[in-house]
Image (tube, rainbow, N blue to C red):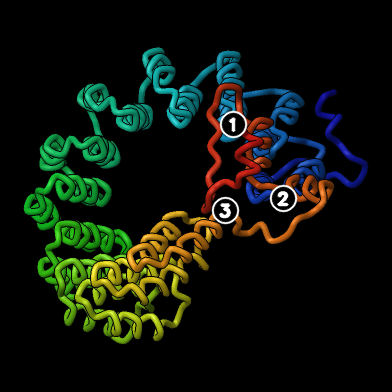
Amino acid sequence: MKAQLLQRHGTYCSSIPPTANAKITHLSRIGQIHEARKLFDSYDSKSASSWNSMVAGTGRSRKVFDLMPERNVVSWPALVKGYMQNGKVDVAESLFWKMPEKNKVSWTVMLIGFIQDRRIDDACKLYDMMPVRDNIARTSMIHGLCKEGRVDKAREIFDEMSERSVITWTTMVTGYGRNNRVDDARKLFDVMPEKTEPVIACNDMITGLGQKGEIAKARRVFDSMKEKNDATWQMGIIMWNSIVSGYTSHGLGEEALNIFYEMPLSGSTKPNEVTFIATLSACSYAGMVEEGLKLFESMESVFGVKPITAHYACMVDMLGRAGQLDEAMEMIDSMTVEPDAAVWGSLLGACRTHSQLDLAEFCAKKLIEIEPENSGTYILLSNIYASQGRWADVAELRKLMTTSYALHDVDEEEKVNSLNYHSERLAVAYALLKLPEGVPIRVMKNLRVCRDCHTAIK
């Protein structure tokens, strides 16, 4: 009787073939819910798999679930997973405990849901209750515990496992690395039986050792990799970039350049945008202007990498550090893209260092045009004026800071209409409607929150 409620007037086929089930799932996942429902309703005989496809795919999963003539071990976890993906963990948990029959998939889905929601204590309790714990469940727990800083507990689960996949090993090594347990990470990494896919672990090892100042050990980890160029080009370049960045962060420009020049000899690995940012930065920190200029000139002509603003910012910083401010300005004038705040900020820093106050004023004004709400630039420009005794300009600038973008007065009705569309307040209102009670609301912007929104939110 319930199944008949879903039927519509029209032409029906006898039963849903497997290809139609796949299409229903596909249409649902790409957001074409009505098309999926239309196809589903065009068949008068629905199999269990077709019902499961609708439950797993549509945004109205609960309604479809309630209309199912029979529910099985596929449809229950599908609905639980749907609630998890929509942030309704409490509803998913309630549904989980109502399941008449829980299989391995059901337990694992609920466990992963708790972990993703950062409810690690609930995940631990559920894990202890699980009748069967497979590799997926154990690895998920290791990941969740490491993410919350409980590395020793994660290691206990790791040691209990009789069989460990490459993913399990990598998860544990990565967990050590991200919790600054570099020595433990290195020891475990050394005994990994398989290093066919150690990219993430290797990167964390290199990064962690570099942050501790042990760049020589980081290089040994890098050299210990039998295949620096993995199955995919992207995976290979990540490791190379990690070691180059490690040398750069310690001002070891020559070593960073040596790694860069070694890359083409390794085979298929080619430098990308990130590689050049790290290497050009190394040249800048080490004062290797000539090498940096040659490297920049070879980017597009030799390696096919088109410079972006980040590369120009590195070059301006390098020339500025060397006191070549005219050349830095020429570099900006030659840019094929619009200079951003990073570019002008690099030149501004060099102008302050070399006491080029006129050019510093020019850079600061450019920065104010690009980032008018960045108070730091106003303060810096005010200090420049003060150092020259230009007190009238200091006063005018401070006035500008308080009156910028209040272009003209408007009547009260227009103010109300304008403020109705402030994105920060809309974001908070949406969060209050959609998020569970007690969940923190975080509003992120590329600029500061406006004064009106801040007052309203308080």
Please give the residue where the numbered disc 2 appears in the rendered image.
Answer: 32
* Residue 415 horizontal/vertical position (percent): 77, 48
Residue at 60%, 47% in the rendered image: 450
* Residue 385 horizontal/vertical position (percent): 39, 66
Q: Nearer the viewer, residue 46 or 447?
A: 447
Give, as a three-letter code, the residue at label 2.
Gln
- In the image, taking residue 92 as reference, residue 109 lies left or right, namely left
Please give the residue where the numbered disc 1 appears in the rendered image.
Answer: 78
Location of residue 257 by image quarter: bottom left
Q: Nearer the viewer, residue 330 or 56?
A: 330
Give, as a three-letter code, the residue at label 3.
Thr
Tag nearer the camera, 3 or 1: 3
Q: Nearer the viewer, residue 80 or 362?
A: 362
- In the image, taking residue 177 as reference, residue 53 lies left or right, namely right
Nearest to N terminus: mark 2 or mark 1: 2
Give, as a three-letter code, the residue at label 1.
Ala
**Vertical arrangement, residue 258 with respect to residue 140, above or below:** below
**Residues at badges 3 and 1 in contact (C-beta under 8 Å)?**
no
Nearest to N terminus: mark 3 or mark 1: 1
Residue at 47%, 56% in the rendered image: 374
Please give the residue where the numbered disc 3 appears in the rendered image.
Answer: 402
